[in-house]
Each structure stands twice: as structure tokens, then as C-alpha cells.
Amino acid sequence: MFNYIAFFILVFGAINWFCIGIFQFDIIAGIFGSQANFLSRFIYVIVGLCGVWLLGYCLFKKGNFQLSSKKIAVKKDNKVNKKEDKKVEKKKEN
């Protein structure tokens, strides 16, 4: 659950940087008054901590970052097992 929150906070931070780069408008500073405001700096720190957390998480998981708990099976060498081949053949026949 924490990874979801960290991911969306990080995306918000990326959108903020996009707006700074393209429009020269800082969303956080626009909401809270200035970049030097305590709340603005607090938000910047939270976004930075989320980035560090997710970077560490990705490195710890060896690049296998998943937001969902569902396991996705990856087929090695693009080989399909025999059971799946038979299912596909039966569907084609019908």
C-alpha cells in the first residue's frame, strides 16, 4: 500500500517539475505561497523521500517493481508450454 502512495506522490512531483520546466510555474509554490514556505519545503522533502524509497525498493527487488500484488508469469525465451499450445489449437478448431 505504501508503494502506491509513494508512486503517486512521485508522479505528482514529476508533473510539478514538468510544469516548472515548460511553464516556469511551480505548482507547490503556487498553492502554498513560495518555495521558501515551510509547507512547500515539507512537500518537496516528502516527494524526495518517496523517490529514494522507490529507488531503494527497485534496487532491492532487482528492478522488479510491481504496484499490484498479482504475479505476472514471464515466459522465458518466448516459449509457450504444451498445455497452452493445445488450448490455442482447440480454440482455432472451434
Image (cartoon, rainbow, N blue to C red):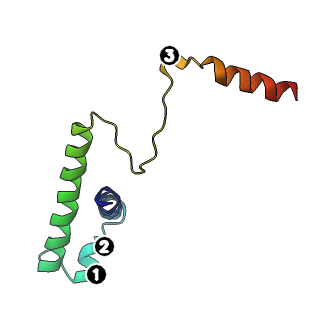
- Is the residue under label 1 in contact with that under label 2 (CB below 8 Å)? yes
Relative image position of residue 64 (x, y in whole percent): 34, 37
SS type, badge 1: helix
Q: Amino acid at mark 1?
A: Ile
Q: Quadrant of residue 85?
A: top right
Relative image position of residue 39 (x, y in whole percent): 16, 79
Q: Amino acid at mark 3?
A: Asp
SS type, badge 3: helix
Relative image position of residue 2 (x, y in whole percent): 28, 60
User: Up-down: is 94 above or below 77?
Assistant: below
- Is the residue under label 3 in contact with that under label 1 (CB below 8 Å)? no
Report the residue at 25% width, 49% height from top. 54
- The CA span between labels 1 and 3 is 50 Å
Mark earlier in primary sequence (1, 3) = 1
User: Up-down: is 89 above or below 16?
Assistant: above
- Quadrant in which the N terminus appears: bottom left
SS type, badge 2: helix
Mark 3: give few (<14), some (14-19) or many (20+) Cα within 10 Å. Answer: few
Viewer-proximal residue, 34 or 44? Answer: 44
Q: Is residue 37 visible?
A: no
Report the residue at 48% width, 38% height from top. 72
Judged from this view, the residue extending furthest toward the front is 83
Report the residue at 51% width, 24% height from top. 75
Circle 2 is placed at which residue position?
27
Left or right position of 76 against 88 = left
Relative image position of residue 56 (x, y in whole percent): 19, 44
Q: Amino acid at mark 2?
A: Ile
Q: Which mark is residue 77?
A: 3
Q: Is residue 10 visible?
A: yes
Left or right position of 67 against 86 = left
